[in-house]
Amino acid sequence: MENKSIIVIGAGISGLAAVYYMKKQLPQARVTLLEASDRIGGKIKTVHRDGFVIECGPEGYMARKPTLTNLIKDIGLGDHLVHSGTGTYYIYVNHRLRKMPEGSVMGIPTRMLPMVTTGLISPLGKLRAALDLLIPRVYHDQDLSLKEFFERRLGSELITNMIEPLLSGIYNGSLSDMSLEATLPQFAAIEKKHRSLILGMKSIQPPKQAGASKKAEGRFLSLSCGLDVLTEKLASYADEIRLKTPVEHVEPGKVTLDDGTFLKADSIILATSPKQLGPLLDFPEAWNLSNDKRTTTATVAFAFKKDEVESLDGTGYVVSRKEGLHITACSFMNYKWPYTAPENYTLIRTYVGTAEDAAVVEESDEEIEKKALTDLRKVGKVGTPLFSVITRQIDNMPQYTVNHNQRVQAFEQALGKIRGVYACGAMFHGVGLPDCVDNAMHVAEEAADEMKESEKAATNL
Ligand SMILES: Cc1cc2nc3c(=O)[nH]c(=O)nc-3n(C[C@H](O)[C@H](O)[C@H](O)COP(=O)(O)OP(=O)(O)OC[C@H]3O[C@@H](n4cnc5c(N)ncnc54)[C@H](O)[C@@H]3O)c2cc1C
């Protein structure tokens, strides 16, 4: 494999993981990483300033998905792994913060008493949600939107006041577009098995252990040194990295750059943003995926002196869309991740912009900062920040709209016919960091296997 070459396009977590797994499979092959921007990391970006560790993109990942944790340990960063702190989470609705009822999972109740007593839902809304116990199945192996699925099962009030703020905090999309099968297939499976979501969710909750410590570990993991250390380390596995090198076209064995020059490779792995897929590959199934909806969002992180901020008995809140605020969620970052702010300081991160309120993200830094601060002050007492860090993702967040899985399958079938060209990334099988790493690992294994086979075939000739 010494004279074999591989090109990976895109230096986000997907491309970086692909580099790592290719080198693991084929240490002798030469791996070149091409990145359009002037930095590696893609959506992962960490700002280290005045003792603050500010994650501008992902802040951590779901601990129950092991691939990324294994990768982190393999590359020697395991000592930096930290679990998130736990704490109450709130929803800002009807002009006040209300606790998420205990036992609710993604807004779906699994315990009756907290649901009966919560002020988040009116008595009528609770009765409507309880109908879930009686009504027949809604999902019949035919994809539908999250809005349709949850509305028919649980009613619109639970959606507006609990499910939508939580899910749009995670996915930044509109529930009426988002695919049940691609985004939350576990709920389709639960309904299939138990019919009622409430009963099904209840049956899969781990039993509360008597005498269990109240300060349990959070469900998220991150790196106390900052996620940029992970991306830097992964990048070090590439034999060559070319920044500011946008790729314009890909065909078997050949990558054309935007200056008209081209590079040759035995294997090419695309790990770009969703909108690039069509232009780069130029076949209908690729265009179908890259023409799908994308959304726009920004994060605004504020550094405060501790006494400038009213403390919160919890780790943050999401905002119901009917409140009409620009911020959709707010995390007290150092309550979750103590290393993110020095002692006596507070780091707050807000999310700004939704599918319906994208224009705000394109406003000036001053304007976004002003709007986010105004909203924060509607919810709690907040003084003057020491500084803020604004990060935009314009038209760059993939949305899994209804029938996404079918489009991905069609794409993968079509791509399978193009020899030596592969694709991975957040636009296919999950947007979470572990999903991206999983996808990159499988694609790299497939690419490496094919290279090994063609090498074997060549030597047998
Ligand atoms: C604000 C925010 C918070 C998030 N929070 C979490 C979280 O807490 N946990 C979690 O698990 N996930 C989270 N996510 C999701 C996760 O961060 C992303 O899904 C993941 O980082 C995407 O990685 P990727 O490598 O597939 O794509 P990207 O990171 O978008 O990387 C694609 C790369 O390709 C490059 N590129 C594009 N076109 C070309 C071209 N033509 N030629 C060369 N290079 C090109 C781009 O410049 C970019 O560097 C969050 C995302 C955001 C934006």
Image (cartoon, rainbow, N blue to C red):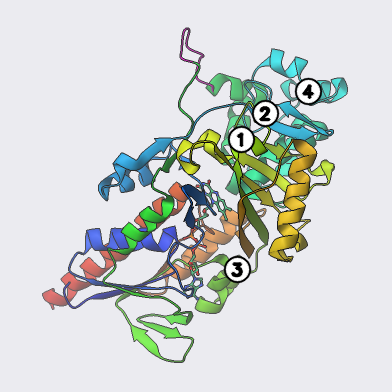
Image quarter of the N terminus: bottom left
Label 1 element class: helix
Q: Earlier in the sequence, mark 1 or mark 4?
A: 4
Q: Earlier in the sequence, mark 4 or mark 3?
A: 4
Amino acid, disc 4: Leu
* Quadrant assignment, res 376: top right
Q: Which residue is mark 1?
A: 187
Q: Is residue 11 magenta?
A: no
Q: Residue at x 87, y 22 (%)?
A: 124
Circle number at residue 178? none
Question: In the rendering, at what x and y percent does residue 165 appear?
Answer: 72, 40
Amino acid, disc 3: Ser
- Which stretch is magenta? 205-213
Mark 1 or 2, closer to the camera: 2
Q: Residue at x 78, y 56 (%)?
A: 356
Label 2 element class: loop
C-alpha separation, residue under disc 1 versus residue under disc 2: 10 Å
Q: Which residue is mark 3?
A: 290
Q: Which residue is mark 2?
A: 108
Circle number at residue 131? 4
Amino acid, disc 1: Phe
Which residue reaches farthest right? 124
Q: Residues within 10 Å of mark 2 (few under 14, many from 20)?
A: many
Using the image as rendered, state which of residue 24 and residue 41 is in the foreground: 41
Q: Earlier in the sequence, mark 2 or mark 4?
A: 2
